[in-house]
Image: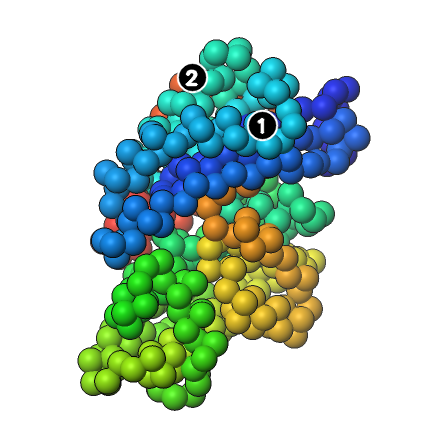
Amino acid sequence: MNNFSSDSNFTVLGIETTCDETAASVVTLYKDGKTKLHSNIIHSQYKEHSKYGGIVPEIAARSHLNNISFIVSKAIEASDNDVNSIDAVAVSCGPGLIGGLLVGSLFGKAYALSKKIPFIPINHLEAHVLSPRLFEKIDFPYLALLVSGGHTQLLYVEDFGKIRRIGTTLDDSVGEAFDKASIILGLGWPGGKNIEIAAKMGNPDSFSLPRPMINRNNADFSLSGLKTALFRLAQKQNLTREVKSDLAASFQFAVADILEDRCKNGLSSAREINSVCKNFVVAGGVAANKVIRQRLKDLSNNKNFNIYYPPIEICTDNAAMIAWNGIEKIMKYGIKNVDNSEFEPRTRWPLDPDAQPIRNAKEAR
């Protein structure tokens, strides 16, 4: 933080609308290099999508449109700042659902224009990967596991803006697998929280499930086979509450095994790239799972890595990480070089544009 040379404090409003949370946050970078998270307001669309068993893009976009003005006002009010103290607006401009991205980016641009302040476009994935740095000093380089509803990737973060993908999912993300598993077991949507709650009452050794890709030499992931195996098992069972809990526990344990094995290879790869790499960041919605957190913490200790997680409330989509990413950009490049009101939202925006596309994809994710 010492390379920030401003002689005054700098406050950023963050806005997040990539998927099914409308969120706004206010973060200040003080002239002594310290930061403060003033507010982090999140409107979840859970009730609007739950009856459909997943996110409906049209409903999501309309909900963002209906709520964004109120959420932004609430974030500023909760921060004890006034609208005139906001020095820049940072907005998640991708990747994500185009409807939500348009709502957030257009609102952010209009707000910035009306206040005559800079507009900073943010890569939502980069914000996840950098989010623990808002709360702790974490030096580059580090290995990052981005594990969310839409992405599962192992990333070598050399520096701000220098990220190399060293492993990715070949099919489903872990978050997607949790959602589908929860639907299979009749536990509802979203799946991550429901599976974790049910698993607490279950025996993880009750059912045998596959661990795709385990013991392979690379750092890639595959979850579709595990999900299919769970579906076939569930079809043969009388899905009582006890059986559901056992299946949930067995599924969660299998996912933890897969993540531990794949991350073990990822940590080795990071050390091969840079022998002094010692930090491991785990971010994204699935990072809130306590069983997975503990397994990866134990792995890191065994491999002599320092592991960092954002707080639970910062694991899922939020605007605090967006505002923080804006501050990191300002510190790295200067405010004049990150002000870009001409930036157009992107449904795809890979952190490593040089990474190879997976299977039939036309571009990297």
Coordinates of residue 310 in the picture (x, y in percent): 59, 52
Coordinates of residue 289 in the picture (x, y in percent): 50, 64
Label 2 secondary element:
helix
Q: Which residue is mark 2?
A: 110
Residue under the image location 58 percent in, 70 percent down? 294
Residue under the image location 71 percent in, 47 percent down? 137
- Asked whether, in this view, residue 107 is left or right of residue 188, the answer is right
Q: Is residue 338 depicted above or below 113 in this figure?
A: below
Q: Is residue 33 depicted above or below 293 in this figure?
A: above
Say if residue 276 shows up in the picture.
yes
- Asked whether, in this view, residue 46 is left or right of residue 117, the answer is left
Coordinates of residue 341 in the picture (x, y in percent): 44, 19
- Asked whether, in this view, residue 198 is left or right of residue 129, the answer is left
Q: Disc 1 and disc 2: Cα gap in Å?
A: 19 Å
Residue type highlighted by circle 1? Glu
Residue type highlighted by circle 2? Ala
Coordinates of residue 214 in the picture (x, y in percent): 41, 76
Label 1 secondary element:
helix
The answer to which quarter of the image holds residue 161 is: top right
Disc with the residue nearer the chain's start (1 vs 2): 1
Which disc number belongs to residue 172? Answer: none
Camera-nearest residue between 296 and 47: 47
Q: Which residue is mark 1?
A: 77
Camera-nearest residue between 197 and 217: 197
Q: Could you tell me which quadrant the N terminus lies in?
A: top right
Say if residue 215 shows up in the picture.
no
Q: Is residue 93 depicted above or below 149 in this figure?
A: above
